[in-house]
Amino acid sequence: MSLLSVKGLCVKYGASQALFGVDLEVAEGEVVALMGRNGMGKTTTIKAICRMIAASDGEIGFAGQDLRRLPSFRAARLGIGLVPEGRRCFAPLTVRENLIASAQAGDWDLARVAQLFPRLDERADQVAASLSGGEQQMLAIGRALMTNPRLLILDEATEGLAPVVRQEIWTAIARLKAETGLAILVVDKSLRELSGVADRAVVVERGRTVWTGAMGALDADLTDRYLGV
Ligand code: ATP
């Protein structure tokens, strides 16, 4: 059974409609890539799942609950950990304070985050504002993990980072998959890296799901059609 099940999701920004029917499933332990060209609706889909914007139609089921019927503070506690586009850590707080601020009971604690990202441990007493872009991204992931989510959502987690740092983030995602079996929904532009970690792909075009299948089945033709420039 799916942990996350999105069906016919529609979202409007005022009078302009952005999503016209997004379908998307993530099973327990599965890594799903949400793909599509710029502006096709990936971030909007994620915001609707996280209840940051309202859906105008469709269903969002998570762990057997209908998210659209829950107040957003309840939805947040059901176990969706978001690493938002653009990171968004609390700049004046230290790394440790950032991590503690989002903590909820469960297996993930400061020690476990330190194991995944030793660099965060080395910088535990530094304010977030003083971190490099890559370190801030690690902190954003660490914060999401501290909520002890059942589903981790990463929106462009490697964007704007140097190649070495990107690789560190991909390694961390691969470790999460292998060592914890956490369900992960990931948006990223790097097809090659996604291919290495995702089980399935969901492709959106103009606010609709247009293709779903095994990551390995996303061949050159499909990539060209749906992701090419
Ligand atoms: P990108 O990779 O560029 O972030 P995306 O696939 O995540 O693209 P969205 O950001 O979800 O795409 O945008 C989907 C559509 O909704 C676009 O047409 C965009 O212009 C529109 N849109 C996004 N945010 C808003 C907003 N706050 N107000 C109005 N329209 C918006």
Image: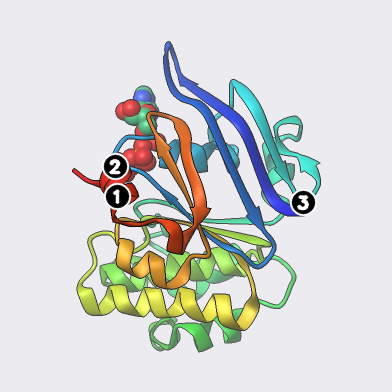
Q: Residues within 10 Å of mark 2 (few under 14, many from 20)?
A: few
Q: Distance from label 1 to label 3 (Cα)?
A: 35 Å
Q: Secondary structure at mark 3?
A: loop
Q: Is residue 223 left or right of residue 2?
A: left
Q: Which residue is mark 2?
A: 225
Q: Could you tell me which residue is drawn at 66 percent across and 62 percent down? A: 149
Task: Quote the CA–CA distance across marks 3 and 2.
Answer: 33 Å
The local crowd at label 1, few if under 14, some if 14 to 19, many if 20 or more residues have their Cα within 10 Å, is few
Give the amino acid at mark 3: Ala
Q: Disc 1 vs disc 3: which is toward the camera?
A: 1
Name the residue located 36 percent from the left edge and 55 percent from the top edge.
Answer: 156
- In the picture shown, does residue 135 fall above or below 73? below
Label pair 2/1, CB-CB below 8 angstroms: yes
Disc 2 and disc 1: Cα gap in Å? Answer: 6 Å
Q: What is the number of callouts on the image?
A: 3
Residues marked 1 and 3 touching at CB (< 8 Å): no
Q: Which amino acid, by three-letter code, is at mark 2?
A: Arg
Quarter that holds the N terminus: bottom right
Q: Residue furthest top?
A: 15
Q: Nearer the viewer, residue 63 or 191?
A: 191
Give residue 213's position: percent from left, percent from top: 52, 52
**Residue count near mark 3 (Cα–Cα under 10 Å), binned few <14, some 14–19, many ≥20:** some
Comparing 201 with 122, the one in front is: 201
Q: Position of residue 124 (x, y in %)?
A: 44, 81
Q: Mark 3 = which residue?
A: 63
Which quadrant of the figure has residue 43?
A: top left
